[in-house]
Amino acid sequence: MKAPKKSRRVVLEPGSVLFLPRGWWHATQTLEDSVHVDLLTAVPTWADRLREEVEAVFARAVHWRTPATAPQLRSVMEAQLLDDLRAAFARKR
C-alpha cells in the first residue's frame, strides 16, 4: 500500500503512545514481535447528529420504508427527500 505524499513515518519505542484523531489515514507495520492496544473513543460527529435527524424523518414516513426496487422512481424520491428534509428542519426552528 502506498502512502500519500504528505505522510509521515513514525517509529514507536517500547512504552510509546500515538494519538491519531478520528478520520486520519494511517497504516501500521510491526518491525518485531510486539503487543499493541487500540483505544477508540466514539465521540459523535456533526455528521452523526445529522444522520440521526434524517433517520428519524425517514422512520416516520411510510414512503421511505418501502423497498427501493423501482429505479424509475429515483427522481421522484429525490424530490420527496428535499421536501421531507425541508419540512423536518422547518419544525426544528
Image: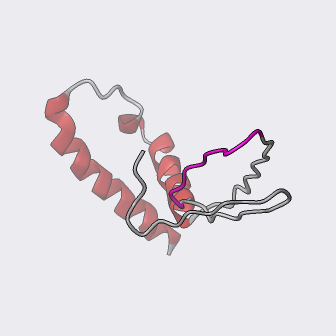
Report the coloring of the rendering. Answer: secondary structure
In the rendered structure, the answer to whether residue 68 lies left or right of residue 35 reads left
Tell me if residue 31 comes above or below residue 19 in the rendering: above
- 69 or 3: which is nearer to us? 3
Q: Residue at x 56, y 57 (%)?
A: 48
Which quadrant of the figure has residue 74?
A: top left
The image position of residue 71, as x and y in percent, is 18, 30
- Most common secondary structure along the magenta stretch: loop
Q: Quadrant of residue 31?
A: top right
Identify the residue at horizontal 30%, vertical 57% (top origin). 83
**Where does the N terminus fall, quadrant-wise?**
top left
Q: Residue furthest bottom?
A: 93
Residue 28 shown in magenta: yes
For residue 70, above or below residue 74: above
Q: Position of residue 22 (x, y in %)?
A: 60, 61
Of the pair 65 and 6, the residue shown nearer to us: 6
Say whether residue 48 is left or right of residue 42.
left
User: Where's residue 47, x and y in %?
Assistant: 51, 61
Residue drawn at the location 21% of the way across and 26% of the way down: 70
The single residue placed furthest to the left in the displayed view is 72
Magenta segment: 24-33
Q: Position of residue 33 (x, y in %)?
A: 76, 38
- Note whether 62 is above or below 28 in the view shown: above
Instruction: Determine the residue positioned at 45% across, 44% down.
Output: 58
Residue 21: within the magenta?
Answer: no
Numbered circles on residues, count: 0
